[in-house]
Amino acid sequence: MSTNLIGLDKAGAADLAEQLNGLLANYQLLYMNVRGFHWNVQGANFFELHAKFEEIYDQLLIKVDEIAERTLTLGHQPLHGFSDYLKRSQIQEVKGVRDGHVAIESILGAYTVLLSQQRQILAQAAELGDEGTVSLMSDYISQQEKESWMLAAYQGRGA
Ligand SMILES: [Fe+2]
């Protein structure tokens, strides 16, 4: 078995890096969508939603960097062109949203995509013995699961 710099099977690390690039593409699309919600939201809840969306996209940007740097740590190059992100992303561009509830539904839908993708990556990383990626995915999953509950509660349809 041929191993990379951090002792993981090379072929397995390449597969995982490929999956992480797909995840990165989704995060980049969602990041830009949430910036749009921050800019364009209107109405009585403007001040709280404007601030909340900023908090969300700041967190997304931290994850963008962590995912890209994990890919490099595995020995591969992260995607860094928007044309690549658009090709690889399952999350679609969302434009011109003024209504806060529509924006939050869009974020909830994106989290469903991310959660499922991250659970898959976690399982694949566990099989490879890649604890670093397992731990990253595990943190993202628990954070977004809790945030999904809170966003759904805001929509008036929490548990
Ligand atoms: Fe701003």
Image (cartoon, rainbow, N blue to C red):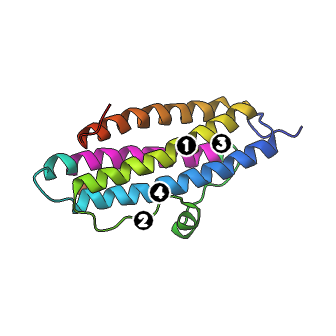
Q: What residue did someone put label 2 on? A: 93
Going from N to C along the chain, the mark reached first, 2 or 3, is 3
Q: What residue type is labelled 3?
A: Thr
Magenta-highlighted residues: 50-71
Query: Which of 66/26 is in front?
Result: 26
Q: Distance between the residues labelled 4 and 1?
A: 17 Å
Residue occupying the far right of the picture = 1
Question: How far apart in space, not on screen, are marks 2 and 3 (Cα)?
Answer: 29 Å
Per the picture, the main secondary structure of the magenta-coloured stretch is helix
For disc 3, the marked residue is 73
Where is mark 4, residue-wise? 28
Q: Where is residue 125 in the image (x, y as percent from the top left)?
A: 68, 36
Residue that mark 1 sits on: 116
Q: Which of marks 2 and 1 is nearer the N terminus?
A: 2
92 in magenta: no
Residue at x 17% of width, y 45% of height: 48
20 relative to 36 in the view: left or right: right
- Near mark 2 (Cα within 10 A), the count class, few <14, some 14-19 or many ≥20, is few
Residues under numbered marks 2 and 3 in contact, where contact means CB atoms less than 8 Å apart: no
